Amino acid sequence: MTIRVAHIGTGNVGRLALSQLITDPRFELTGVCVSTPAKVGKDAGELAGLDIATGVAAVNDLDALLTTQPDCAVYCAMGDNRPAEAIADCTRILAAGINIVGSSPGILQFPWQLMPEKYISRLEDTARQGNSSLFITGVDPGFANDLIPFALASTCQNVEQVRCMEIADYATYDGATVMFDVMGFGKPLDELPILLQPGVLSIAWGTAIRQLAAGLGIEIDEITENYEREPAREAFDIAAGHVPKGSVAAIRFEITGMVDDRPAIVIEHVTRLRDDLRPDWARPAQPGGSYRVEITGEPSYAVDICPTSKKGDHNHAAIVGAAGRIVNAIPAVVAAAPGIRTTLDLPLITGPRWNKF
């Protein structure tokens, strides 16, 4: 029996998720909601970059989308710079009795101890009243720092530290809002972007740290954060736009969950726009970018995850992974108990149909 799914947001992740929704026989697409006026009225197949006419035209009205009575909504609208609006959207969807799987708002990956309890309770109450559930995920924060570390830790007799790293060149990532407004690339070093405002890193990746701690049965005493940035030696262009000389061209940051004055869980990002910047920072395991999970314990592990794609580079492959995790989780989330669901709650999600060669 197919699952009826509505889709919201056709940006980098959303477009790829929409493509799978259209081509995966497990799902029936009921509608698409967009925020860009030029996309309104376009067929979902065109928005997904497919040579397919679905007969489903995009709207820009969430209420109109919900009248299509889907079992689940895939929510991939931008949430980094509009978290309150994204949470409000999710509340409306849950209240309508519709399950949600999506990429934002990121704090709902694991909001406990990060979001005021009254707001969590409000969402949980709404979900129970609507008999609906919500699962927010991605790649990092997402499966690279919950599913994969949990799989490795499940083989350990003891664990002393978990470190999750993203080491990537973002020059080919074409999301201008994320690159310039959120992360601050191409901006003067004396200008703090959204991501580096005090406490934002600890919230954005605190979800991963708190979830790992919950799964490992430890109590985090505090979460600390630090960052450093490197200016461009000369002006150059990237997929998202122009990077002036002297503006931010590389960032390294760490978010650390401390236990008894020791770094127990560490999330580290090394993001460059050119490969020659800061060679002293961690290097990826493959050209362009990779993820790394290091577990110190018995046994210890150092595992590099190198995403590749037939249709793009490492950045594209990582986004495909995020979209795939979202869409493949739909059946489990539809079957789940009402409320905010996490990787700790859901069964092992094994993937889509087998691709016959």
Image (cartoon, rainbow, N blue to C red):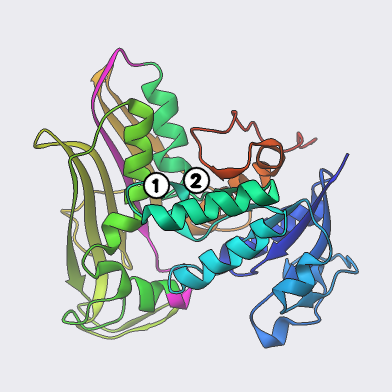
Residue 355 lies in quadrant = top right
Residue 317's disc number: none
Q: Which residues are magenta?
A: 156-177
Query: Residue 127 at what x, y percent from top left?
Result: 62, 50
Location of residue 216 with respect to 51 vertically, above or below: above
Query: Residue 119 at what x, y percent from top left?
Result: 44, 58
Of the 4 image quadrants, the one containing the N terminus is: top right
Location of residue 31 with respect to 242 vertically, above or below: above
Residue 307's disc number: 2
Q: Nearer the viewer, residue 289 or 36?
A: 36
Q: Are marks 1 and 2 in contact (CB under 8 Å)?
A: yes
Is residue 236 visible in the rendered image? The answer is yes
Residue 290's disc number: 1
Is residue 239 visible in the rendered image? The answer is no
Instruction: Give the left or right position of residue 134, taking residue 264 as reference.
Output: right
Secondary structure under badge 2?
loop
Question: Mark 1: few, some, or many residues within 10 Å (few <14, many ≥20)?
Answer: many
Secondary structure under badge 1?
strand
The residue sitting at 67% across, 66% down in the picture is 8
The residue sitting at 44% across, 26% down in the picture is 151
